[in-house]
Image (tube, rainbow, N blue to C red):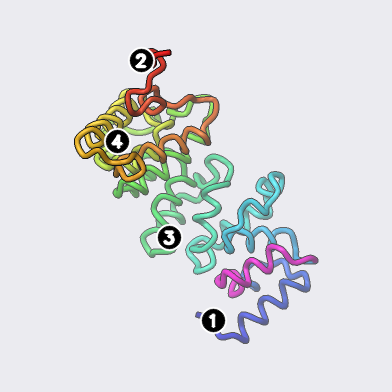
Amino acid sequence: MHPPSILLTATARALHGASDPHVIEPALCNPRLACVLALAPNVHPVISALGALAGGLPDVIPSAGRDSPALHAAIASLIGTDAGARILPWWAEVAPAGWGASHAAALIDAVQRDRCPCWAAASLIGPTNDAAALLHRPQEIADAIRRWGQATSEDPTAWVDCLAETQRTRLLSALCADHDAAASCLPWLPEANASDVANNVVTHIKRTYRAADLPLALNPYVAALSLALNAYATAPPRRPHQACRYPVGAHPARQTA
């Protein structure tokens, strides 16, 4: 934690137009002050964007601003810092595809020093074997696959061909062992894996629904189904897997007039 005087000095400098991210770095480490920088007038555009990311407000940054070379350079200079640790997870959600490829070594080092989450570094680097090697837990695998798939919306599973077979198999095996994590990235999984996950979730919903007579809202697998449908909502034009659309025997062909 920075002393209050350092935080206030950094914030005051930003509010008066300072443009050096390292001068105002202490303010970026405080989420409330970061939000002030994101929303206050007269703040330099790059500092405002950094504040938005550090404060968890990435949508405040206009689309054109996300492509700013000055912003890209500022973020790269903060990799491995405390401010970078706050910025990189949010930047991973909105960064241009492959932004981190040229910063792969720095991002991997930041992961090893607990200054960047594994999934964020892998997402920013893109689908490479080095990026995949960072991923072990199902949810971090899911988050990285989601961002890799979103980067190529015309071919949501293009990431599969970028990885060696051993890495691809390892990631998919670990991911599919967790139905919630797998469901959250269903639109970006290879068809065979997506079908297995969807059918497994829906089979469990039907089995527990009939055996325990539980309301659907209390069924533990309904959360996975909800995650899958939410994922499809952010992955147009892909339609939800058919098993997800008719989870409890409500397929139109089975309905009676």
Q: Residue 35 carries which label?
A: none
SS type, badge 3 = helix
Instruction: Name the residue at 27% across, 41% down.
Output: 214
The tag earlier along the polypeptide, 2 or 3, is 3
- How far from the left and from the top, in percent, is residue 213? 25, 38
What residue is disc 3 on? 110
Mark 2–mark 3 Cα distance, whole angstroms, equals 54 Å
Farthest residue toward the right? 42
Q: Do the residues labelled 3 and 4 touch (CB within 8 Å)?
A: no
What type is the residue that disc 2 sits on?
Arg
Q: Nearer the viewer, mark 2 or mark 4?
A: 2
Q: Residue 254 carries which label?
A: 2
Mark 3–mark 4 Cα distance, whole angstroms, equals 25 Å
Res 115 quadrant in image: bottom left
What type is the residue that disc 1 sits on?
His
Instruction: Name the residue at 75% across, 72% down.
Output: 15
Res 31 quadrant in image: bottom right
What residue is disc 1 on? 2
